[in-house]
Each structure stands twice: as C-alpha cells, then as structure tokens.
Image (cartoon, coloured by chain):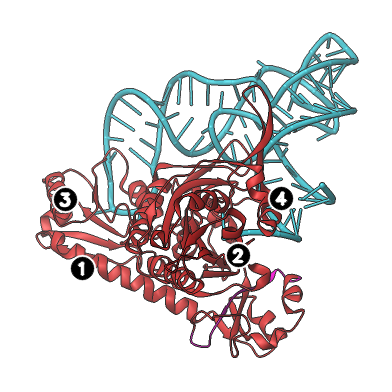
Chain colours: A red, B cyan
Amino acid sequence: MPPKSVLTPQSVDFPQWYQDVLNKAELADNGPVRGTMVIRPYGYALWERIQAEVDARIKQAGGQNVYLPLFIPESYLRKEAEHVKGFSPELAVVTHAGGKQLEEPVVVRPTSETLFGEVMAKWVQSYRDLPLLLNQWANVVRWELRPRMFLRTTEFLWQEGHTAHATEQDAASYALRILHEVYRDFFTQVLAIPVLVGRKTKKERFAGATNTMTCEGMMRDGKALQMATSHELGQTFAKAFNINYTSESGQVQIAWTTSWGSSTRMVGALIMAQGDDNGLRVPPQLAPTQAVVLLVRDEQGAGEKARAIADALAANGVRVRLDADVASSFGRRATKWELQGIPVRIEVGPRDVAAGTVTVARRDTGVKMPVSLDGAAQAVPALLKEIQEAMLAQSSAWLASHIADAATLEEAKEAAQTGFARLPYAALGENGEAELGLQALSVRCLQREDGSVPASESEPGIVAIIGRAY
RNA sequence: CGGGGAGUGGCGCAGCUUGGCAGCGCGCCUGGUUUGGGACCAGGAGGCCCCGGGUUCAAAUCCCGGCUCCCCGACCA
C-alpha cells in the first residue's frame, strides 16, 4: 500500500474523494457548458463494458435495438399531460435553426416515450405484431440545476427500452422481468453491487407512468442511488399516440406499454459503491483490463518473462495489459493501476525471476503473494472469479449491516442518517413522505417483507425503504 | 432562482490590502543518474492575469458594468 494516499480519504470528505477519483483515475472532465461532461478513454472503456453486458441481457429478453431522432416536435410532448408537466422544467428547446426562427420549436429529447409512441402506432397493426420489444442506446438532455459528474449531468448516455403489449398483464410481467433479468442481474453479477428492488411511491413515480419500479443501490457513504428503473405506462401513451391493434377476434384494442432505462449514472455507482481510499475497484467481470503485468525492471530476462505471461494470460481469455514502461518509476505505475482499479496486478522483476516466481497483487484486498512463474497464467482466471465473488460478498455484507428496522417514522429518520431504514408502510402515515423531505430523506422504494416487488401500493404488510439519496 | 466562494502557464495556487520586471508547487520537454509503492540532479518551454470600460506616468492589483465556473438549498435517471 502507498505510504500516503493520493486521494482525499472517503471518511474525510466523500464528495471530494469522488472528485479526486474522477481526476486521478482519468475518468472524466467537466465540459465547457455547465453540467456537461467529457468522458475520458478509461471512463468510456468502463461504459463500453457496461453497455456490452446490459445490451446482451436486453437481447436475451427479446429486445431489438433501434435508433430514433434526437429532436422531437414540441407538440409530441404535450400529448401526454403528466409527461410534459414532469419534463417541462428541464427541457432544452431549439427555437432557431437554419438561420431563422422555427415554426414549431423542437425539443432535444429528455427521454423518448413520445417518439416511440408515434413509431409504435405505425408499426403495430395486429395482435401478431405484439409484443413489440424495442431498445435504443442514445444521449439525452435534461437541463439540470445541480449537476454531478456521472450521477446527474445535463447530457447523459443511456439505454431506453420501450415495449408494447397486448395485455396489461403481459406489460406488467415484462417490466418486472427487465428489472430482474437485465438490471438486478447485471448489478449483482457484473458490478458486484447488491440492489434493493421495489416499487416507487406515487410521489416518486415517472411522469406519465402507472407504476415505476427501481433498483436502489447503497453507496459507501450510506446514500441511496437509483441505478435503473422500469415503468409500466398503462395505456396513457398508447391512447395519446393511438397504439392500437386488431385482436384475434377482430376488435380494435389499445396496447399497453412499458419503458425502462439505465444510464452513465451506473459508472458513478461503480465508483461510489466499490471504490476505496486507494481509488477505483473494478470487479473482474466488468474490468476492461482484468490484469496488468507490471515489469519492474528489465533485468535478468524479466522483460521476456513479463511478455510471456501477458501472452499466456491473453490466450487463457484474460483481458490483460503489459506495462513495460520502465522509464517510469515502479511506484508511479503501481499507483496508477491501483487508482484505475485493475483487479489483478502481476509484478515481474529480477528478484522474481531469480526466485522463479512472480508477485500477484489483488486490488480488492491489497494482498500480495508470490506465485510460481509457470503457474501464474493458469492461476489468474480462478483468482478473478474469486475476486468477483469476494467483492459481491463484501458489498452484500456492508449493505446488510446498514439496513435497520424501524417501527415509527422517528426511528426511521434516525436510522436513515447512516443507511437505509425499513419502516412498515402503514406506519409512514399521510404526511410521512413530506415530513421526510424536510430532512432530505425519501422513500426509496416499497418492498414486500421478503424483498420482492409489491403488486400495488395498497398491498398489506409492505415496507418502505427510507434513506438519503443522490 | 435564493445563500456563499472563485476566475492568474495544462492542473493547484500565491501576488491584490499599500498600483511599479508575473511568481511558486505539480505536470510537460531535453540530458544524465535511477527503478520492488507517486525517484533525483541539471537545463528548458509555456501567460489576452475571465471580458468590456474607466482612473493613472503606470493596473493582475483601484473604480464601474458584464460573463463564467464551483460549493450549499428547492426539481430529477
């Protein structure tokens, strides 16, 4: 471990620690326009890995990718009253183009329900066209009053899924399936971040939805982060855009739609849920580089050995990188890879060569150990698997130790200062949510006793998860 | 939009009170010595001091106006 930290320790100033990581791990810079962000190569590499994993799961669930335009006629947004009401304050509107004022202003998409509504109405004619399962990877713009890099930026990258179904039941079960099989699975299996799945209260619901479901993760400062959402849109958009189909019996029916999304915010979640005082910790399943072979000094054939190990690792399917830049000092390079959270570091120097070993360092625990030179390439895949499991186990234990049961609103407020409080929903009371708001607390989601997603807000015996949120 | 802070080499800052050669640390470039946890020595490059106006022999510094960014509160993935 370094003698002194390069970063502000988390315990001293968590937001500053976050800023330090962004800079030192070379993830992102501020853009010239307030709230915008320049994603640097390493930050983008993380995003590309996230995209690949999420995209594969969407395809597995039957989704097909499309691309719809950035610009939306302003009139489209007005077609759904709740929707436009919810988004109006943060719209970027183009009023001038081509050197003159536009007849009808055009909004830069804040989300694409309306455009998908228009398109689906065209594409859906018969019950045979349903379900229609679409997704797009795109940028969207929401004029944020208070931006934070990766967590809340004016422009961000995301995927938004939009589907149309013949029945309410089919729409509901698909929205739930996405929540579980795409999002929760990705968060736990790849990011090694356990999440609470649940239903949003009416107050926290997406503008225009009949039901919003969420994956809530806990960051290392005890605050909640909504990491993905899945919405049932009922027939509100279908009615507004005439997404109709002819049923098997020949009657014209209105479709039921859903939408669901996850964004570059997930990079922020990775940083804040897995990072430590030495920087980022990237789980092996996600890591663009899973192992770095670090040549200490090119003496006694260490350079050749290092290359041979890197080649052998690549042949074993490990995403590996060789750092033979001996013009830079060892400490500088070791610190760099540690800041970037590369899961495994294999140090090869003359001392190792003489002993017939290499030094293998785990980023998650910081433990270093000698491994025989010949066995190193074989041992790494198993080690990566072990690290992945250890990281999930660690974050799960941490989450569990930061959730407390509360019987009253007062108890919940107390418990939510350091983590999440579980309060019987019935004990929240009429003005409970408003009261929580005064202390910057909110109901993150509603769950059943067993942690599953309730079918409705009025289901008996459900609990409210209360916490501070980003 | 309310409250607070700041704009000076790439980054972080000092200088401003009391006007007088534009500085420091880090980074960068060259050469050398180094290298097992952010190495050292020597040399070097790099500036519209946020913008506009004013005062003055002289403005980074004083005055007036504007812009931008950051932090804290109300809305949000």
Compared with A352, B18 (above or below) is above
**Residue A456, located in which quarter of the rendered image?**
bottom right
- Do the CB atoms of the residues marked 3 and 1 lie less than 8 Å apart? no
SS at badge 2:
loop
Disc 3 and disc 1 on one polypeptide chain: yes
- How many angstroms separate mark 3 from mark 1 (CA)? 26 Å
The front one of A3 and A387 is A387
- How many angstroms separate mark 2 from mark 3 (CA)? 63 Å
**Residue A58, located in which quarter of the rendered image?**
bottom left
- How many angstroms separate mark 1 from mark 2 (CA)? 44 Å
Q: Is residue A416 magenta?
A: no
Query: Label 3 is found on which chain of the structure?
Result: A
Query: Label 4 is found on which chain of the structure?
Result: A
The residue where tag 2 is placed is: A209
Mark 2 or 3: the one toward you: 2
Residue range in magenta is: A438-450
The residue where tag 4 is placed is: A89
Mark 3 or 4: the one toward you: 4
- How many angstroms separate mark 4 from mark 1 (CA)? 51 Å
The residue where tag 1 is placed is: A382
Bin the neighbour count of mark 1 within 10 Å (Cα to Cα): few under 14, some 14-19, many 20 and up. Answer: few
SS at badge 4:
helix
> Would residue A369 be visible to someone looking at this image?
yes
Q: Is residue A449 magenta?
A: yes
Query: Label 1 is found on which chain of the structure?
Result: A
